[in-house]
Image (spheres, helix red, strand yellow):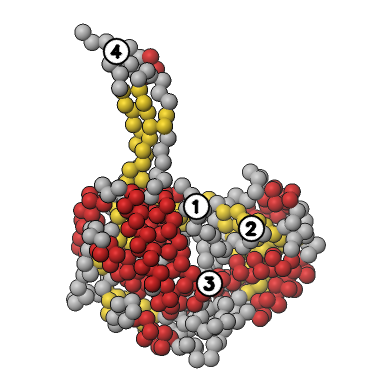
Amino acid sequence: MNITEAKKQIMGKLELDDVNSGIFYGEWAKIEGRDTMVSYSPIDGSQIAEVTMATEEDYQKVLDRAQESFKIWRDIPAPQRGLLVKEIGNELRKYKTALGKLVSIEVGKTIVEGEGEVQEMIDIADFALGLSRQFYGLTIVSERPHHRMYEQWLPLGSIGVITSFNFPCAVWAWNAMIAAAAGDICVWKPSSKGALIAIATTKIVNRVVEKFGYPPLFFLVVGRGREVGEWMANDPALPLISFTGSIPTGKRIAENVAKRLGRTILELGGNNAAIVTDQTDMTIALRGVAFGALATAGQRCTTTRRLILHQAIYDEFLTKLKNIFEKVKIGNPLEPGVLVGPLIDEKAVENHLNAIQQAIHQGGKLIFGGEKANIPGLENGHYVIPALIEANPDMDIVKEETFAPILYVMKYRTIEEALEIHNNVPQGLSSAIFTNNLRDEEYFLSPSGSDCGIANANTSTAGAEIGGAFGGEKETGGGRESGSDAWKNYMRRQTVTINYGKDLPLSQGVKFDID
């Protein structure tokens, strides 16, 4: 299927036009007289549509309306909020194919990955429904007679969500569905490279909100990344900013939010490694490493970027992995059988090529791939051949995250040495070990083991489930979103003390008498 046919199929279904409003503040802002940005497909470089960008006045209108909505939404009982989120998930099910195809067209994911992105939104809506009856607080023993203490969790306010192109709607849903169940309002600043996906998603979910008679809950502000991001980071009306993106930008946002004593959830760079021991299931390990390195053309924050191989199986494993890399199908992600689609833009291709040159200059050995890929009929697309590079763990480029399909391969002798190599990078998102040795697995999962927020045994670094809290350590940011008790980020904790006695005893035995 070519992109023109695919575009015709979905534009009408998703209520998208040649020029679309990128501002939703309870209604869609008019497009006349506004600056626009163009959405291009990385598949063939063609223009998909245009999107209007928000002014600071538009942004303020969004925030004002969001505050109005919060005053109503916070008092809706949480189980009722959960029922609305369930209906949003049901509505997304109806658009899974069309919205998934738009994900493929606008950011270059394969059809399976595009629909998988929408499925994540559906899954987190289901999760949030159950969660809406489980915002539990503790009962606390009081040291004073006739006193009862407990804690409760209350809605936080309007939260800002800034997302990246590589998961253009799923990460928004991780935040927005949990926040909605918690009683919050969501203000979304999507990547400019995924703006059409954001517009389509916002239309779908707000139709459900309107149908059930609630005020607008999900707002949208499309604009220049740094400009809108600065407005949000410095705005005390947004007590929480959830940001997914680069480490330098994340640090700047964290600094601005901290100055006003706000909260952040930061999902920044990942430089993930897989350790493969000499006692491994070779088939599982090869599959897990290949998927981790190649999925989404290496443009996942959980992509496997470093492979740490035991010396006893080094040659055999690397030979088999190279064979997989040689056979992987690269091309139009709308076509069946394609596993590696395009990079997001030409700048990403340049970064891929530059990283390989740096690796060679620093002493690495290119084993396979690395060059631009010329796909017949898609000469204006952004394709590369995934690269395998034998590397030294101390090379500077190995410690950086390049958002492209480059896998650095390193050799180790002992599990202690493997973990030392593994942890010797600034980032700490996802990690994996492939082994049938229980001691090696447990060491990997011990306090002396992986220093990442996600640690996997016999499965890939990529492909986290929504039920677990997602996030990392060190320069990855330390934030957590999605499952487990990540919901606590979107609420405020309140400790309550009730005196039901006829006296006023004070804590710590303090005496305070008045005549």
Contact between marks 3 and 1 (CB within 8 A): the answer is no
162 w.r.t. 420: above or below: below
Tell me which residue sits at (47%, 82%) in the image. 43
Q: Which residue is mark 3?
A: 296
Three-letter amino acid code at disc 4? Phe
Q: Which residue is mark 4?
A: 512
Contact between marks 4 and 3 (CB within 8 A): the answer is no
Sequence-first tag of 2 and 3: 3
Tell me which residue sits at (54%, 67%) in the image. 402
Q: Which residue is mark 1?
A: 469
Observer-side mark, 3 or 1, equals 1
Other residues around mark 4 within 10 Å, as few (<14) / some (14–19) / many (≥20): few
Find numbered disc 1 in the image and state the secondary structure of the residue it sits on: strand
Tell me which residue sits at (60%, 64%) in the image. 304
Q: CA distance from mark 4 to mark 1?
A: 46 Å
The disc label shown at residue 42, or none: none
Q: Please name whichever residue, 22 or 155, is drawn nearer the observer in this view of the structure.
A: 155
Three-letter amino acid code at disc 3? Thr
Mark yes or no: residue 135 visible.
yes
Find numbered disc 2 in the image and state the secondary structure of the residue it sits on: strand
Q: Which residue is mark 2?
A: 432
Q: CA distance from mark 2 to mark 4?
A: 59 Å
Find numbered disc 3 in the image and state the secondary structure of the residue it sits on: helix
Sequence-first tag of 2 and 4: 2
Quadrant for the C terminus in the image: top left
Three-letter amino acid code at disc 1? Ala
Q: Where residue 157 appears, x then y in whole percent?
A: 29, 49
Instruction: Looking at this view, name the residue that lies furthest to the right.
Output: 312
Observer-side mark, 4 or 1, equals 1
Number of numbered tags placed on the structure image: 4
Q: Please name whichever residue, 17 or 395, is drawn nearer the observer in this view of the structure.
A: 17
